[in-house]
Amino acid sequence: MDPIVAPATRLINQPVGILRISGSDLLPRFSPLFHFSSSGLIPEPRRVYRVRVRDQSGETVDDGILLYFRSPSSLTGEDVLELQLHGNPHCLRRVMDHAIELGARPARPGEFLYRAYLHHKISLLKAESLNRLIQAPSFQDYRRQFLDYSATTPGPIDEIRADWVDLMAQLYVLLDHADLGEAELPKPGVLLEKIDSLLLRIEHYRESYKKNRMRWKGFSVALLGPPNSGKSSLFNRLLGNDRAIVSEIPGTTRDMIEGRISTEYGDILLFDSAGLRETTDPVEEKGIRKSLEAVRLASLVFLVESADSTMESRAFPDGSVSKFYRVWNKSDLMDNESPDFHFRVSARTRKGIAQLYRFLEEQARSFYAHSYEPDDSTEGVVSSERQYRILSRLSTHLKKVRRMVGVSSWEIVLHELESQKAMMEDAVGIVSHHMVYDRVFQGFCIGK
């Protein structure tokens, strides 16, 4: 595989910046990237070295720490070089450019973890747990994902695979040992019981996912309103940076823009949306549809209006009235004393912003306090849309297999069950014939 390079920290001004390189035989190729205080030093794996780092011209641009991990004892299963440098983004980019000139290519999103999976360093389920752990919107969700990631016992998805393999093993016995007496062979009724038990377990985890997936996404707030009401200005003010483009031209925001506010209770996910109006522009129209979809999924909605742009009550989108709060923006230009508005703010002068922010924090506190159920043992296990879709397809397939038992031949039933092997492997990894035969010998004393 090609060597890959990527920053393990964001390219912003910060105390420390980390670059990682993964590939085969890295030291000979990337030795021009750094030099040691002692000439001729050959680094040993899992040791820490002080190094000076060069750019493409050979000029020393930084000094820092080098860690070297040799295959297969590394994150990815390949050789890994990690440089811990001062966190200036311009310097980090220069060092990355030098690594690319020496033969590395920029890593794609998640590629380090993908290589870890390819080299059997991590399972698909562990990789998903790790991603959810990093993205967790609150400490409670982080803790749940950490328990899933660090667990040494099989999780529910692994148990579903074990039951599915056991079902295949019983069908192997029926086909390979048809000459045995009926007393020694699995009964159709036993197969049906196993299928029913597996279907119940799958449905339980699917329902658990549907119940919890909105909380796993975090407390979300959508800013909705007509064009020029100052939604993007308010969005930027709440985030404290200019994420959204601010313009007097109506329809500037054409897609959903997401920002994240971290509080002690949990994250507040803020969405700036396209302005609601009649339009013939297909791109803007698509953005408006996304805005209305965000309203349906959001925990709370701010309907932002101003003297420049107001909404008629009949134009309010459908949904639970309790989650809609009307915000009068640009109050420094023209105030509105109508009791219909919950907040009066000015994104430009910061008037009312502190009150609005405290309200958001209180709503986030309530959301995370009431949505966390510490006694829910399945929480966070089936926590990705991919796993949920796989379980849904497996449920449909098993219902078909159940209808075939006692009607079709065992060969056809087994063929139907095996046809979903690729789907099962997508969920948890390789399902080999050795696993099936191991289960045969564990479960049945055939020939001792």
Image (spheres, rainbow, N blue to C red):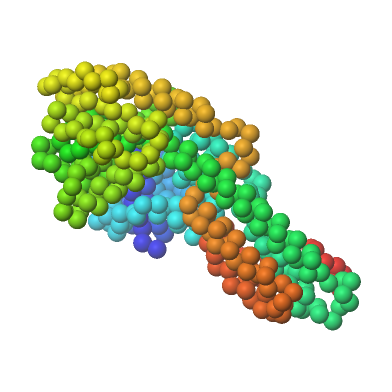
Q: Is residue 350 visible?
A: no
Quadrant for residue 233, please give it: top left
Position of residue 322 measured from the top left corner of the image (x, y, whole percent): 40, 30
Front residue of this view, candidates 139 and 25:
139
Q: Is residue 20 above or below residue 416?
A: above
Residue at 33 percent across and 48 percent down: it is 6
Residue at 13 percent across and 31 percent down: it is 308
* Number of numbered discs on residues: 0
Front residue of this view, candidates 58 and 75:
75
In the displayed orientation, state which residue is furthest to the front: 314
Q: Is residue 311 above or below residue 444?
A: above
Q: Quadrant of the C terminus?
A: bottom right
Quadrant for residue 176, please give it: bottom right
Position of residue 81 measured from the top left corner of the image (x, y, whole percent): 39, 48
Front residue of this view, candidates 79 and 205:
205
Residue at 16 percent across and 33 percent down: it is 309
Q: Quadrant of the N terminus?
A: bottom left
Position of residue 88 measured from the top left corner of the image (x, y, whole percent): 25, 35
Front residue of this view, candidates 176 and 221:
221
Position of residue 180 measured from the top left corner of the image (x, y, whole percent): 86, 78
Q: Is residue 180 above or below residue 378?
A: below
Residue at 27 percent across and 38 percent down: it is 314
In the displayed orientation, state which residue is furthest to the bottom: 179
In the image: residue 141, left or right of residue 344: right
Q: Is residue 323 visible?
A: yes
